[in-house]
Amino acid sequence: MTLRRRTLLTLTATALTASAVGTTFALNPDVLGTASAAMPSPATTAYRPELPKPTGRYSIGTTELHLVDRARKDPWSGSGKPRELMASVWYPAVPGSGARTPYVPAKIAGLLGAELTEPLGLKPEQLDYAGASTHARAGVPALGRHPVVVYSPGFGTSRLMGTQLVEDLVSRGYVVVTMDHTGEAPVLFPGGRVAPAVVRVEELKKATSVRVADTRYVLDQLRKLASGGNPDAGHRKLPNGLRGSLDLRHTGMLGYSLGGLTAAETMLRDRRVDAGVNMDGTLQYGFPAGELIESAKRGLDRPFLLFGGQTHTHLSQPGAPMNDVSWTTFWNNQRGWKLDLNLPGGTHASFADYQFSAPGLARHAGLPDEVVEGLLGTVDPVRSVAAQRAYLGAYFDRFLKGRPQPLLWKESPRHPDVKFVR
């Protein structure tokens, strides 16, 4: 089974048509077929995406952590070896010059690039992920003490595919920790070892349990880090000031697709997470039918934000293709603060880095606009990125920094693509 076929859109609002089940994106195959037939010869140079510039005032630093949980055996490899994870810590940094870190390591750039090129009918070599750069510098000194946000990606999706949202939060004054859930997507470990994707869509319930355990272990390691320890398995040198930069008294969690489900389930089981966000992920094991997760059945007593695309909302829509019973149930049971935001012109893919990379890639390859719309919907990509960043920043500012945020009160003319669902 290819990575594209494994990626979980059965857990998303865009995976509600037969043509999209189990695929990375809900791209109409008729549109793709027409586009492929009319496609001009591909450009001779690969497209190198450029990440949107962060909007906050802080410079960005980053470092990796190789984490080994010796209390757990890896549930997917069958090797009996301890569970291994890779995490990145993104933090406000001392301003300075120097080389920016690569967006995607060269060793896995082709594997991750195929997630985007294959649905567009392109070849992986037409996308230069490895040549793209983030806005962060590796290992530079940290600046100040800040609330912490943990990021969990979608099923079959790397932690790297949320970088544009992560960078913006860091620039606004947050330490953001992104993690891969080994076995679901290719993961590069120190020394060049790549752990392959092996988990099947049919194993969602088990995968969720593993993800929650992964997240709680990462939270344990962050506490160790903040207490002066070095949780990296190889004890690699940490950036100066990093230990003092984590304010774990104020911790949030952000998840895309299955990562959003992971955020809700982690909050149900771990009170260290004060506020959570679900970016377009259902809250049940499978879609359109599936067992509800516990947090949907019971709700949470802390703030939680739902942010969906197309008509994926908490409103009951019997018979409609995007009727998500799990969101309706969660909404009715939620005891803490809640908000349901909707991006009607966007799709599931709009909530990952594909929102900024796919339009440029399609133009570079000479694809018609209809192909991009089949992937990302009709929302303007620049406005979509700006709106997501603004609402996420306002949400965490409200609940991790205690700052009132009028943006969360009602729809804003500054972000006309986002609707409040009451």
Image (cartoon, rainbow, N blue to C red):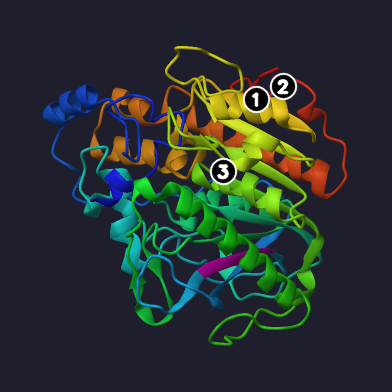
Q: Say if 156 sits above or below 34 in the image.
A: below
Query: Could you say where residue 248 lies in the image, as x and y percent from the top left?
Result: 79, 63
Q: Say if 358 sits above or below 170 in the image.
A: above
Q: Amino acid at mark 2?
A: Ser
What's the residue at 44%, 22% (across, down)? 378
CB contact under 8 Å: marks 2 and 1: yes
Mark 2 to mark 1 CA distance (whole Å): 5 Å
Q: Amino acid at mark 1?
A: His
Residue placed under numbered mark 3 in the picture? 261
Residue placed under numbered mark 2 in the picture? 412
Residue 128 located left or right of residue 264:
left
What's the residue at 27%, 28% (across, down)? 19
Residue placed under numbered mark 1 in the picture? 415
Q: Earlier in the sequence, mark 1 or mark 3?
A: 3
Mark 1, secondary structure of its residue: loop
186 magenta-colored: no
Query: Could you say where residue 77 lies in the image, as x and y percent from the top left?
Result: 35, 70
Q: Say if 313 sits above or below 114 in the image.
A: above
